[in-house]
Image (tube, coloured by chain):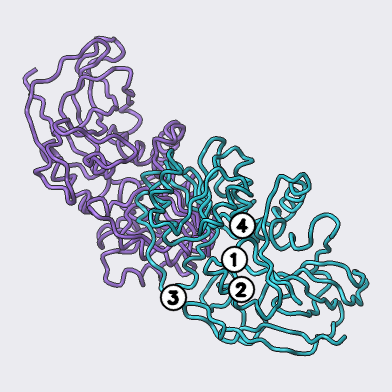
Chain colours: A purple, B cyan
Amino acid sequence: MTESNLRVLLRARPEGRVEPGHFEIREESPPSPRPGEALLRNRYLSLDPYMRGRMSAAKSYSAPVEIGAVMEGQCVAQVVEDPTGRFQPGDWVLGGQGWQRFSAVPAGNLRKLEPGLAPVTTALGVLGMPGTTAWVGVTEIAPPRPGETFVVSAASGAVGGVAGQIAMRMGARVVGIAGGAEKCAFVRDELGFPECVDHRAPDFAERLAAACPGGIDSYFENVGGAVQKAVFPLLNDFARVAFCGMVAEYNDPSPAPGPNLMQVVRKRLKLQGFIVRDHPRAFEVWPRTGAAWLREGSLRYREDVVRGLEKAPEAFIGLLAGKNFGKLVIEVT
Amino acid sequence: MTESNLRVLLRARPEGRVEPGHFEIREESPPSPRPGEALLRNRYLSLDPYMRGRMSAAKSYSAPVEIGAVMEGQCVAQVVEDPTGRFQPGDWVLGGQGWQRFSAVPAGNLRKLEPGLAPVTTALGVLGMPGTTAWVGVTEIAPPRPGETFVVSAASGAVGGVAGQIAMRMGARVVGIAGGAEKCAFVRDELGFPECVDHRAPDFAERLAAACPGGIDSYFENVGGAVQKAVFPLLNDFARVAFCGMVAEYNDPSPAPGPNLMQVVRKRLKLQGFIVRDHPRAFEVWPRTGAAWLREGSLRYREDVVRGLEKAPEAFIGLLAGKNFGKLVIEVT
């Protein structure tokens, strides 16, 4: 093996905005598998907004990445060697190997992928954690009833795009929110949402209200900030809000106050946060359901593939600013 | 009949704080029942925080009281005459007669009370709308599991006192929040809460944290404002909040912002508003359940009875400032 092990480590914790200097890129020798471990060559790394939380020491639902440790993340990899005999060299697997080219990990923690069934990268996006997140949020946390208005922010993203498509299948009238004309056109023309509103428009709040003449019954929250401010006054009585994330505020060291909650009483709102890993059964249900929809051509998705692990910090910084277009994946060259 | 019909009308809509001048007290002739109506002599009028909302024209879950109309409210009354034959003179009934001494109302809208089963005023408080509100909030909206910490604000009030007692029966560790040492002593000594924290203490937030060393799993919100600010950081992962009311903010013409909602994601909180009348079945279940507990002596309550309908405006203004002590009832002399 002549390739080095390129690795992206956390060098320093950001206080606000993430900068390239918070990361350190190192070349090391590939690891040797210990008993029970397989050696993997990672091929695709998933970049997701939740990783911003792992960079901070603030109390959250997961322990932070330690300073000097490799950044966490899910990868699609190929097995180099597996002394446990569970996998053959060349097998495709999914696991949490992090931002690096090679990994030696317990073979029992890996899930085998069938490249013939769906492109392997879908295991990181539409059929993976983001798609499963969408499934949980729409079907369990803020389910729309037929004919109701369902709104999702970051609608061109890995989670939002799937969320809207699931809600349409449930009979809702779906309105997306995305940043820029190109993303909005994609959401309408490719994903098939009847409406998508550009949150960068100066009259965004008015446009959103016009797109939701009957108000909003169910909202899938991915971004927070100004988008949340525009959505809240439009919520109908008994509206449900699935709080999946608030990416627009992840870089904010002193988060702005939220809406006055008197409307929660008046409108009998239900605001509920969720994290997909609390819903393990969904990881059984969604990948199978989504794969069937993919095969029949009724589930659409878009990937934003960036070549080169060394580009991961810049691509991640762009993700937090909404610069990606579709599920962001690093091709680990 | 020599008594006049004393009535309290809405004279003007308050923009902020409610003042006596927003009401008008008039003496008129008692009404005559039209076909289908019974003539009632109201004996007890319930005063409740929700009435603040009815004084404003702002969109809410109910239509506002019109300027010049009698203030809305529930009364326990005695039948003077009932040409429909449904009731006998002297029968005790419950209905929405409003802030007045006499009313002619459709006899079919009245519920007959059995004075032998429980004091008639309990139909306005512990066994009535406030008690039923507590029942819905605790059992349906933010149910605590055995051993969990349940916190309720306005714990000496008509709703809060019942909410805490129901939560204790469900096996929760119950912590009350009330204003002043006297109310806190009542909540502990009379209602049997293991803890009650005085929100007027300068170190209220620290005291609340000390009273909830394991955090808060379920919160019954009646007041909002500074109390809400102190509660939110203590909420545990998967905590539930029943939003019943935010009386501390009802007089505020420009409500303050609420908490940043990122913690809703991180902690997977569920914040849910409710209004008791959306839960009609609870009006079948709670009065019967509560009456049984009253008879066995295991349900405690306190009434704050003010004599004289002309005192209703002042008493209501005091209610919004937390000056009542227990369920506020006007004895209509």
Q: Nearer the viewer, residue B196 or A229?
A: B196
The reply to whether discs 2 and 1 touch (Cβ–Cβ < 8 Å) is yes
The reply to whether discs 2 and 3 touch (Cβ–Cβ < 8 Å) is no
Instruction: Kindly report the distance in space between the C-alpha atoms of the residues bearing marks 1 and 3.
Output: 23 Å
Residue B8 in sight here: yes
Instruction: Kindly report the distance in space between the C-alpha atoms of the residues bearing marks 4 and 1.
Output: 13 Å
Residue A298 in sight here: no
Do tags 3 and 4 sit on the same chain? yes
For image coordinates 46% across by 32% down, the residue present is: A281
Answer few, some or many: residues within 10 Å of disc 4's Cα (few below 14, many 20 plus, some between 14 and 19).
many
Q: Which residue is mark 3?
A: B253
Where is residue B154? Give x, y as percent: 54, 57
Q: Secondary structure at mark 2?
A: helix
Answer few, some or many: residues within 10 Å of disc 2's Cα (few below 14, many 20 plus, some between 14 and 19).
many
Q: Quadrant of residue A122?
A: top left
Q: Quadrant of the N terminus of chain A?
A: top left
Q: Nearer the viewer, mark 4 or mark 2?
A: 2
Check the residue under mark 3 and report the chain it is in: B
Check the residue under mark 1 and report the chain it is in: B
Please tell me which of labels 2 and 3 falls first in the chain: 3
Q: Nearer the viewer, residue B321 or B38?
A: B321
Q: Secondary structure at mark 3?
A: loop
Do tags 4 and 1 sit on the same chain? yes
Q: Which residue is mark 2?
A: B315
Please tell me which of labels 4 and 1 falls first in the chain: 4
Check the residue under mark 4 and report the chain it is in: B
Residue type, label 3: Pro
